[in-house]
Amino acid sequence: MIRTLALAVTLAALAGPGFTQSDTAVEAFSDWSVFNPSDPRECYIVSPPTKTEARRGGQVVSVNRGEIRLFVTIRPSEGVNKEISYTGGYPFKPGSTVEVSISGNKFTLMPGSGDSGEWAWPVSPERDAEMISAMRRGASAQIVAESARGNQTIDDFSLLGFTAALQKAEALCQ
């Protein structure tokens, strides 16, 4: 339920070619931006990938994708504390998982279904916390997923500025 609500809020933030006008960045720290929309009360940090690639049958292919973003959301009034979410810009293959590598640590995200089929989250808040810890220590994250059309995507994210952005979001949402 909470993750579905997070999806609805995040989808609103990504409507159209960019973020909504009400979602103005509070501050940017290298590759991560901090947002603090006034309604609902929440804070989130977000980063686009620094590199993307798609493959089919082992060969690099060109594909059309929507917004590709990695988020961490804080929503104290709903008990959401540093929830990670990822949107790959396409519907994930049903029954698949999304694999994340951060400095040799491996994590699995589970895609949503239906309207949330373009989003994935760690399986539990404990996994969110473990992944956040790795992101604080790491330099980059690589996310590998499979689309409903059978394409494999590889998205690289810089973690430069992650810790400072998260600290700012935590301070804003106390």
Image (cartoon, helix red, strand yellow):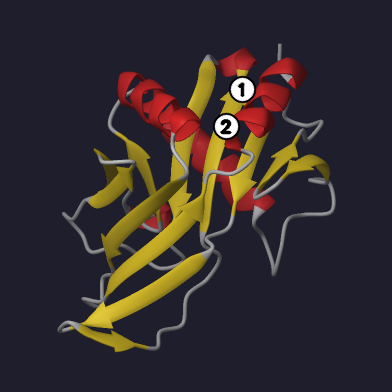
User: Residue visible at 51% across and 43% down?
Assistant: 7
Q: Answer left or right for 55 relative to 67.
A: left
Total numbered labels: 2
**Left or right for 52, reference 112:** right
* Disc 2 to disc 1, C-alpha distance: 7 Å
Placement of the N terminus among the 4 image quadrants: top left
- The three-letter amino acid code for the residue at tag 2 is Thr
Q: Tell me what residue is drawn at x 64 percent, y 56 percent.
A: 14
Which numbered disc covers residue 59? none
Report the amino acid beneath label 1: Arg
Q: Residues within 10 Å of mark 1 (few under 14, many from 20)?
A: many
**What residue appears at the point 47 percent right and 43 percent down from the top-left corner?**
139
Quarter of the image for the C terminus: give it. top right
The front one of 134 and 35 is: 134
Percent position of residue 173, x then y: 71, 18
User: Which circle marks residue 73 in the picture?
Assistant: 2
Mark 2 secondary-structure assignment: strand
Q: Quadrant of residue 34?
A: top right
Q: Nearer the viewer, residue 3 or 74?
A: 74
Counting from the top left corner in percent of width and height, residue 4 is at: 45, 37
Task: Using the rendered view, name the quadrant where residue 132 is placed.
Answer: top left
Marks 2/1 in contact by CB < 8 Å: the verdict is: yes
Which circle, 2 or 1, is nearer the viewer?
2
In the structure shown, which secondary structural element does the residue marked by tag 1 occupy?
strand
**Label 2 neighbourhood size at 10 Å, few (<14), some (14-19), many (20+)?**
many
Q: Residue at x 34, y 77 (%)?
A: 54
In the rendered image, residue 17, in percent from the top left (x then y), is placed at 69, 69
- Whether 14 is drawn above or below 76: the answer is below
**Residue linked to disc 1:** 75
